[in-house]
Amino acid sequence: MSRVVLRLVLSTVVAGCSGAPALPRAQPIGDPTATAVSTAKPTTTANATPSPSDTPVVTPSPEPIGFLPLGDSYTIGTSVDESERWPNQLVELLGDRVPLRLVANPAVNGYTSADLIRDELDLVDVHRPGLVGVLIGVNDVVRGVPEERYRANVAQILDHLVERVGAGRVFAVATPDYTLTPAGADYGDPETNRAAIERFNAILQMEAEERHIAFVDITPVANRAGTDSSLVARDGLHPSGRQYLAWAELIEPVVEEMLSGE
């Protein structure tokens, strides 16, 4: 009996030593408060296309419109600096709102309407402007050109301009009353010439409006030259740069309306 018990005990011990599975080695426990460090690389997008809201909108500047002023001493600005001439000051006033480029200023001191036709009118085809200004008539008055001859010349000038650039791209400017200036009396009888200037301005205005051409009356400003010496140039006869600026300020809204939205 004792042998049997002993044998059973030994068998149990042997079995426990040889057949029991090994327990896995315990792994060290890390700090539960530590933050895990990711080894993954950040994702980047090469050549990412910006959204439309991030792309700046660039509005191209409008191309300047070529401007050609025609006329006599009042257009070329006798006795004032080039920058003080009314065409130049008009370009400056309009600035970027209605950009103009002065392609030329072929006006000549002493020119009549016939001289303009002969020497200036063909330059419209040469320079191909998008805007033309006309101021002519004072020397027709001084030289005694008949009214009907002046009217015919004005009609020829305006018809040519309408054909080449269109009525909506042409404007005419009144002639100032030079008899109000200190030297005005040196060029004929003031009363006679003043009346003639008024009639010639009326002709220019009528011929312009019949063709739907804008007419700018600068005489309210020019007439102040009789009492305001700052409006007269150093020669005592022609407008000063200050007066030309006032002209340009009258012409500016007319041109802006003509060219707005184009």
Image (spheres, rainbow, N blue to C red):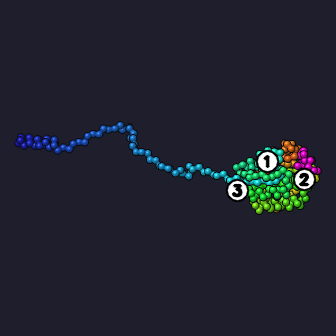
Query: Circle 3 is placed at which residue position?
Result: 261
Residue 114 shows up from this direction:
yes
* Image quadrant containing the N terminus: top left
Q: Position of residue 52 (x, y in %)?
A: 56, 52
- Distance between the Cα atoms at labels 3 and 1? 27 Å
Q: Name the residue located 8 percent from the left edge and 42 percent from the top edge.
A: 7
- Mark 1 and mark 2 lie on one chain; the one further toward the N terminus is 1
For the residue pair 168 and 104, the one nearer the viewer reads as 104
- Mark 3 and mark 1 lie on one chain; the one further toward the N terminus is 1
Determine crowd level at label 2: few under 14, some 14-19, many 20+ residues with C-alpha closer than 10 A: some
Query: Circle 1 is placed at which residue position?
Result: 85
Q: Which residues are magenta?
A: 178-189
- Mark 2 and mark 3 lie on one chain; the one further toward the N terminus is 2
Q: Name the residue located 91 percent from the left edge and 49 percent from the top edge.
A: 187
**SS under mark 3:** loop
Mark sitting on residue 142: 2
Q: Name the residue located 81 percent from the left edge and 56 percent from the top edge.
A: 119
* Amino acid type shown at disc 2: Val
- Distance between the Cα atoms at labels 2 and 3? 41 Å
- Distance between the Cα atoms at labels 1 and 2? 22 Å
Q: Position of residue 174 (x, y in %)?
A: 84, 53
Place residue 213 in its image quadrant.
bottom right
